[in-house]
Amino acid sequence: MVQSSLATKSQSFDLVKHEIEQTIKQAESSLERFQENRESGEDLQNCVDFLNQLRGIFILVELRGGTLLCQEAVSMANDVPVGANDDKNILLTTLNGALFILRRYVEYYQQQQQDHPELLLPVINDLREARNEKPYPESCFFDIDVKQRPDFCSSLPVAPFEGNEADYEVMARRMRLTLQVALLGVLRERSEVVSKKLLGRAARGFSRLCQGEPMGQMWCLVSIVADAMLDRAMGFNKARKRMLMRIEKYAREVVYVGKVATAKDAPDSLIRDLIYVLYRSGSSNPEVTEVLSAYNLQPTDFPDSMLEAHARRLYGPGADVLKSLSEALQEELNQLKDKLDIIERGIEPDITELASIADTLERLANTLMMLDLQRLAGHARQEVEKLRRWEKEKRLPVDRELYELADSVLGIEDAVMQMVTRGITSETDALAGARIRPEESTYLREAMFVVADEARSALTLAKRAVTAFIESDYDKLHLANLPATLHSIWGGLQMVNDPDAAAVLARVAVSIQERLLDAREAPDNQVLEALADALTSLEYYIESIGKREESNQDLLKLAASSLDDVGL
C-alpha cells in the first residue's frame, strides 16, 4: 500500500478514534452489568449492538483485525443466553478479554500508524475455540494465489532414493519417527533447535521418497521452512503446532498407503501456511527469496521477532502506565543532567558529586534491569564504572569524558521517552548505544512539534494580515512585521531539516516584501490570489510536520506553482 493511502487511512482513523474508544467502553460496561445480572437481556443486547457498531467503524477505516475480532465477538455474545449459568463463564471471560485487547490495539494503532491484524489473531482464535469452532490459520490475513506453484525442489539438492519396496517402507517409517520426535519436542516445548533440525531432516528424507511426485513439492517446501526457522530462531506458536500436526498426517499416509500416497497434491491452505512462515521469517537466504519471488513477494520488514515484541507490548502495560513510568525515569534523569551541568560549568566542582551521580545512575540501571531492558541497563552500568573510577582517582572528568557521559545520559533519556510509543520491547532496548537516525530522535520530533505550532500560528497571522491589507484599501501597516515573522519560521524549517518548505516560505516572504510592501502601485488580484493559495498550501503542509505520516510534497509543489504562475 502506498504511503499516501496510509496517510489517508491514518487521518480517517484519527477522526473516529474517540468514537471507537467510547463505544468499546460502553460495550465493556454493558457486558459487566450483564455478568452481575444474568437476567438482563437488555444489557447483553446493548453489548452486541456496540460490537456491531465497532465492526462497522473498523470496516470504514479498513482495520481488518478489528473487523474480524468484532465479528467473532458478536457470534460469541449471541451464543450466551439470557440467564446464563456458570457453564457460560468461559465465554464471558473470553469476551471480556477480547474487548480489553481490542482497546489496547486501538491505542497501539494510534501510536504506530500501522495495521498489523496478525497481532489480534490469537485473541480471535481464543473466541473461536471457546465456541468450539475451528481456529483460523496463521496465514489468515496473508493474501496470495498459490494455485500456480513454482518448483520448490529446484534449490534443494535431493539425492534419488535407490532401493526396493522393503527399503522404501523402512526409510518411510524411520523418517516418520524422526518427524514424530520433532513434533513431540515442539508440543512439550523442549529444545526447539533440535526439533527444527529433526523436522528438516525428516522433510528431506520424505522429499527423497516422494521425488518426482506432487507430494515431493510439499516436503521440499517444509525443508526450506525448517531451515529458515532454525536460521532466524523462530518459535512455534499454536498455529504452527497445528500446521505440523497436519504435515504429520501426510507422513502417516506415505507409511501406511505407500507410493500411491505421493501422487496426492498438498492442499492450497497448507502451502499458503508454509509460504507465510517463510515470508514472516524475514530471511534473505537464496532458497527463501526464490520461493517468495515466485509470488512477487519480498521478506517482510516486520519479521517474526518484531511481531513477538509488539505482541508482548500489546498484552503488556498500557500507554497510561508507560507514560507514568517514563515520567518517573525522566525525573531521575533530569536530576542527573542538572548535576552534570554544574560540573561542566565549573561551579564549585566537588569530586564527591561524582558518587552521587553514580548512585543515581546505578538505581536507574537496576530499574531498567527489572523492566528487562538489559542493553540499556548495561549501558548505564558502564557509565557507573567510569564515574567510580574517576572518584577513585580523585579527579573530575576532562571535557571529552564529560561530553561522552552526557551523550550516554541523553541516549538513555531518549530511549525512556520513546518507551511511551515503542513500549518495553527489544526495539526500545536496542536504542542503547545505537546511532539514532535524525528522523527517529525524540528531541527532533519535539522540535518539529514546536516548529509546526509556531509555523501554523505565523501562517494564520499572515493570511489575516493579507486579508486586512486588502480590506483597508492596501494599508501597508498591516504587513509591516510579516516578512520578519515568516523569516523566523524559515529558520525553524531549516533547523528541522526541511529545506524545500523553507525555500517556498522564503519566496512568499520576498514576494510580500517586494510586490506588496515596496511596490508603489496597488497589487494585481492575480498576485494576491497566488499568495493566498501559496499560504494555504503551506498551512496544509505544515499540519503534517511532526507526525509519523509522510509529509505531502505535492502541497509544496502546488504552492511553488501558484507563485510561478504570476512570476513571484
Image: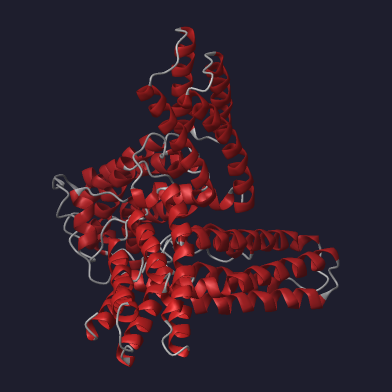
Which of 107/445 is in front? 445
Residue 157, x across and y down, in percent: 14, 47
User: For residue 427, which quarter of the picture?
Assistant: top left
**Residue at 21% in and 82% down:** 567
Q: Is residue 84 left or right of residue 421?
A: right
User: Which quadrant does the C terminus fall into?
Assistant: bottom left
Colour setup of the view: secondary structure
Which of 142/194 is in front? 142
**Residue at 23% in and 46% down:** 168
Residue 31, x across and y down, in percent: 75, 67
| In the rendered image, the vertical position of residue 88 relative to residue 155, given as above or below | below
Residue 254, x across and y down, in percent: 31, 54
**Residue at 47% in and 53% down:** 446
Q: Is residue 92 left or right of residue 487?
A: right
Which of 129/318 is in front? 318
Q: Tell me, yes or no, if residue 174 can be seen here.
A: no
Q: Is residue 567 left or right of residue 132?
A: left
| In the rendered image, the vertical position of residue 106 relative to residue 411, given as above or below | below
User: Which quadrant does the N terminus fall into?
Assistant: bottom left
| In the rendered image, the vertical position of residue 320 relative to residue 132, given as above or below | above
User: For residue 210, which quarter of the picture?
Assistant: bottom left
Which of 145/353 is in front? 353
Q: Tell me, yes or no, if residue 50 can be seen here.
A: yes
Count of numbered marks: 0
Q: Is residue 95 left or right of residue 82?
A: left
| In the rendered image, the vertical position of residue 17 relative to residue 342, given as above or below | below
Residue 310, x across and y down, in percent: 48, 51
